């Protein structure tokens, strides 16, 4: 296809049967090459982001070294690698950082599979965190064997309930989940602020936060901070993958996502599936929040500065909404977070550089035509569905 | 080197005094897409004052060739000559500037804009650098229409016009831009027989005024009726050129498909039994809450095909959707086999033996991103043997899919290929395989062959007849009048949400049904009055 993208689009729109032939040819590739093609786009986005990051570092190197230092990116990136993979503790830290990203990433990813854009992972995460903290403090008198499961379950249920609401609204009133979940994110922030600075405020705390969680704290089993919450993510990935690709429920979720009309004709119930999918998403994000509070933070701050629920969108997109892809995307972002500290110490690059990299990756995923052009990747293969979900019009009606 | 052989024969193809000079010549056009040769050394020569039909199945390369002509695609090889001068066409605007215009099958009109605005779009005449010169443009459009005897108010909104009139607006648009070569892509696809005749008159008129017309179609009798020359394309190559007086429908079909084709289904006598589907007093509303099906009643007997004819948009879609549980019913009853199924869910109906081949297969028929395995068990995924409890049995699903693929002759490298990778005909075979399989009582076929090639149409018609003979009740809804006439035992004509008449298929003809479709059985004048 030597013509520009616009031409190809026009062709495809006007003459679907014929234009499908060339596309079809690329879909008939053997599985290995198809997998390669699917991976090429995210990999290309990462490579480009690292190059853009390097350019930013070189341009700003006078601020660090007093002069242009073309080697600064190398120093910074090797520190990033050393900080995330260089030692046992570094690896454990990478896993700890990746855990909430993977869980919340699954929450966004399963939404994409059902054709839903769950921006509300942040709110679901916060509600899960708050509920886990509240129960964790309330069960301080109980032994860990009871306190931990109760607190985790509280977080799971709170997240699930918080995902149920936008699902219900979408199914029965047609309220778009993007609008409702964004609003619910603000509601969650305010609820957390109120509860942690009001009814549950810790007495001896120097700033507005709850008491410290004691018996419900997740035990550390590896390195300095490798808590058992890592296993939640490790177990959630195969369970969600099984659910999506091996169970009838997952088949229904994917069908509703890919073609709601065909799903309805096939006897599936899109409304129920939208509610269920949003609830499962909320469950996963709530688990992420519970894990983070019980395993990492140890209390619930009233002004909890986290962006896990939003980073999860990037994770889900980079992982192409596939559980295994989300696992690796979460590990990558986790590694960058884990290594950022060493990068700041050794190269003088602020930890915020990691956010820049993450944003640029997302940019290139969204503007995939650029990556396609630079890496000569043809259209097709899996993964375009997420972007369609994001760009789909807000006026669409829920299938009756 | 196909062009080396083909070019001389083109030159010798007679200098008919009737026809004018060669306006457009496409020489040795080749276009390859990865894995597909869409055009392979195609030669095409069109003269002023001729209607040149381009005939070929879907995927034969007609659209690619026309996209190249219209500047939407760049050929890998070959050249385009306008008035004997080689040109490179750089996009649609360039094509229009050079006098090539295209009337697409799906009109490229903006429904909310007026006729004048639609015609001016893309080439707006300016009174001054800021304001449009609407007045003189309207006058020119009115004059242009009047020269065809059309009373067309340039201020009318396009959305309020019938399909036939919209097509005339498209043609006016082309003429307004001083087109000399006019390409019409399946112009009769959604017209009634009457409208088709009218558009043919327009084409003949344009021919007599010296326009060069390329007429793309796969309806053989239309091509024979209106064309001066016919070029047949198969798999990207020109396989033959014919003059209508020296060819037949069978000859053209064979050229198109590459083998002998049975154009009319050998359907034999039907032996209808008891009514299986009984509909009475049915009222249905559309998405905007307007009543579009009024008090419709009919029955379909076991072992018969009941054809529902009608111009698109007369309530057929809503009627079908309500019968399948996809749209709620405001009044009336539907019984299947004596069982009341008014408003039953799609799954319940499927369990009772109702199959459905939808008009829009991309909407209801297949999930394009899913493999054939999943598409073939889309209705039955939830029960044994395809699932045990919540666990899907991939082996059973795969075996079933391979079974159906063999049985219904779906051309695919494997069952793991996504439905989107198949041609339209094969996608439809997937739908037919899924819906025709199993214990069937009623089949609803909604435009089952729309956009399909001759070979696939033949196949689907045969399958339908076989099901009829096996005692299945079949409701066939189609805007394709020929299909309704050819397959049905009885024909109900729908007009503005009512069944205006039920005819015995053996005792009626195209004209009678066509007139009923267009007017609802009233005098044409009265109908026109009511329409305005």
Image (cartoon, helix red, strand yellow):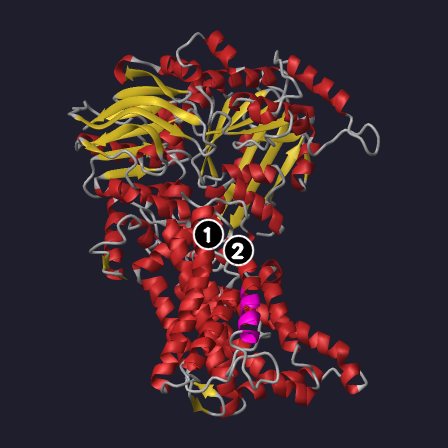
Residue A192, magenta (yes or no): yes
- The residue drawn where x is 49% and y is 73% is A130
- The residue drawn where x is 52% and y is 64% is A317
Q: Which residues are magenta?
A: A188-198
SS assignment for the magenta stretch, majority: helix
User: Residue A18 at what x, y percent from top left?
Assistant: 48, 43
Q: Nearer the viewer, residue B137 or B259?
A: B137
Q: Which residue is mark 2?
A: A180
- The residue drawn where x is 43% and y is 48% is A172
Q: Nearer the viewer, residue B217 or A350?
A: A350
Across the whole image, how many numbered discs are drawn on residues? 2
Position above or below: B393 against A300: above
User: Residue A33 at what x, y percent from top left?
Assistant: 44, 65
Position above or below: B200 against A264: above
CB atoms of marks 1 and 2 within 8 Å:
yes
Residue A59: quadrant of the picture: bottom right
Q: Which mark is residue B391?
A: none
Asked whether the viewer can see residue B500, the reply is: yes
Q: Which residue is mark 1?
A: A169
Chain designation of label 2: A
Residue A204 is left or right of residue A103, and the answer is: right
User: How far is disc 1 from disc 2 in space, using C-alphas?
Assistant: 8 Å
- The residue drawn where x is 33% and y is 24% is B308
Q: Nearer the viewer, residue B251 or B189?
A: B189
Residue B146: quadrant of the picture: top right
């Amino acid at each position: 296809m030597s013509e520009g993208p616009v031409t190809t689009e026009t062709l495809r729109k006007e003459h679907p049967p014929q234009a499908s032939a060339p596309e079809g040819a690329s879909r008939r590739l053997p599985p290995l090459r198809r997998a390669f093609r699917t991976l090429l786009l995210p990999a290309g986005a990462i490579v480009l982001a690292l190059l853009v990051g390097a350019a930013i570092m070189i341009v700003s190197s006078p601020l660090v070294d007093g002069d242009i230092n073309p080697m600064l990116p190398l120093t910074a990136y090797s520190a990033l690698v050393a900080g995330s993979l260089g030692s046992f503790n570094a690896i454990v830290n990478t896993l700890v950082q990746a855990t909430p990203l993977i869980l919340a990433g699954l929450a966004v990813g399963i939404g994409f599979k059902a054709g839903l854009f769950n921006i509300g992972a942040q709110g679901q995460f916060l509600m899960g965190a708050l509920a886990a903290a509240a129960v964790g403090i309330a069960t301080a008198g109980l032994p860990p064997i009871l306190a931990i499961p109760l607190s985790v379950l509280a977080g799971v249920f709170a997240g699930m309930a918080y995902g149920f609401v936008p699902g219900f609204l979408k199914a029965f009133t047609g309220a778009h989940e993007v609008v409702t979940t964004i609003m619910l994110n603000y509601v969650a922030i305010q609820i957390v602020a109120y509860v942690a600075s009001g009814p549950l405020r810790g007495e001896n705390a120097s700033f507005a936060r709850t008491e410290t969680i004691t018996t419900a704290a997740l035990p550390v089993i590896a390195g300095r901070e490798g808590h058992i919450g890592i296993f939640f993510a490790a177990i959630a990935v195969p369970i969600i993958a099984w659910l999506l690709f091996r169970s009838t429920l997952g088949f229904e979720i994917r069908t509703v996502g890919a073609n709601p009309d065909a799903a309805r004709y096939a006897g599936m119930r899109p409304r129920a599936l939208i509610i269920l999918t949003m609830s499962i998403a909320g469950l996963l994000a709530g688990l992420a929040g519970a894990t983070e509070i019980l395993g990492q933070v140890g209390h619930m701050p009233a002004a909890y500065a986290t962006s896990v629920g939003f980073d999860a969108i990037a994770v889900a997109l980079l992982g192409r909404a596939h559980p295994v892809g989300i696992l690796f995307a979460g590990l990558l972002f986790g590694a960058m977070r884990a290594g950022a500290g060493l990068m700041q110490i050794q190269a003088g690059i602020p930890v915020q550089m990691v956010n820049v990299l993450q944003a640029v990756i997302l940019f290139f995923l969204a503007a995939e035509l650029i990556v396609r052009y630079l890496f000569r990747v043809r259209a097709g293969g899996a993964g375009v569905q997420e972007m369609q979900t994001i760009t789909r019009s807000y006026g669409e009606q829920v299938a009756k | 080197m196909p062009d080396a052989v083909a070019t001389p024969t083109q030159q010798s193809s007679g200098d008919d005094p009737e026809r004018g000079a060669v306006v457009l010549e496409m020489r040795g056009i080749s276009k390859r897409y990865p894995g597909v040769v869409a055009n392979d050394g195609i030669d095409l020569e069109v003269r002023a004052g001729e209607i040149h039909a381009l005939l070929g199945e879907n995927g034969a390369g007609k659209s690619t060739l026309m996209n190249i002509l219209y500047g939407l695609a760049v050929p890998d090889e070959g050249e385009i000559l306008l008035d004997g001068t080689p040109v490179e066409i750089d996009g649609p605007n360039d094509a229009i500037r050079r006098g090539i215009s295209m009337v697409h099958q799906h009109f490229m009109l903006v429904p909310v804009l007026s006729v004048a605005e639609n015609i001016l779009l893309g080439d707006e005449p300016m009174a001054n650098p800021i304001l449009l010169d609407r007045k003189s443009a309207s006058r020119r459009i009115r004059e242009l229409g009047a020269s065809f005897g059309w009373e067309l108010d340039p201020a009318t909104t396009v959305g309020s016009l019938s399909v036939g009139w919209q097509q005339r607006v498209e043609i006016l648009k082309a003429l307004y831009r001083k087109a000399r070569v006019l390409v019409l892509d399946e112009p009769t696809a959604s017209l009634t027989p009457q409208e088709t005749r009218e558009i043919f008159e327009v084409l003949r008129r344009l021919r007599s005024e010296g326009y060069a017309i390329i007429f793309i179609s796969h309806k053989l009798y239309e091509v024979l009726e209106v064309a001066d020359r016919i070029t047949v394309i198969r798999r990207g190559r020109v396989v033959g050129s014919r003059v209508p007086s020296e060819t037949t429908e069978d000859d053209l079909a064979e050229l198109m498909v590459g083998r002998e084709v049975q154009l009319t289904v050998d359907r034999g006598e039907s032996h209808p039994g008891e009514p299986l589907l009984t509909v009475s007093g049915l009222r249905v509303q559309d998405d905007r809450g307007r009543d579009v099906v009024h008090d419709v009643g009919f029955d379909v007997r076991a072992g018969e095909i009941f054809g529902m004819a009608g111009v698109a948009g007369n309530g057929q879609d809503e009627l079908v959707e309500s019968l399948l549980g996809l749209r709620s019913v405001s009044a009336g009853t539907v019984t299947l086999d004596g069982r009341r199924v008014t408003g039953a869910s799609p799954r319940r109906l499927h369990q009772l033996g109702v199959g459905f081949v939808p008009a829009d297969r991309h909407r209801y028929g297949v999930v394009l991103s899913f493999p054939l395995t999943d598409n073939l068990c889309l209705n039955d995924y939830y029960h044994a043997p395809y699932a045990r409890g919540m666990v899907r049995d991939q082996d059973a699903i795969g075996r079933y899919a391979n079974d159906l693929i063999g049985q219904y002759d779906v051309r695919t490298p494997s069952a793991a290929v996504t439905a989107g990778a198949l041609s339209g005909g094969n996608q439809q075979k997937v739908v037919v395989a899924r819906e025709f399989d199993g214990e069937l009582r009623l089949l609803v076929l909604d435009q089952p062959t729309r956009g399909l090639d001759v070979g696939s149409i033949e196949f689907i018609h045969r399958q339908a007849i076989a099901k009829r003979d096996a005692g299945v009740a079949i409701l066939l809804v189609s805007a394709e009048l020929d299909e309704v006439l050819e397959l049905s035992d009885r024909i109900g004509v729908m007009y503005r949400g009512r069944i205006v008449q039920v005819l015995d298929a053996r005792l009626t003809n195209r004209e009678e049904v066509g007139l009923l479709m267009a007017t609802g059985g009233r005098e044409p004048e009265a109908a026109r009055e009511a329409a305005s």
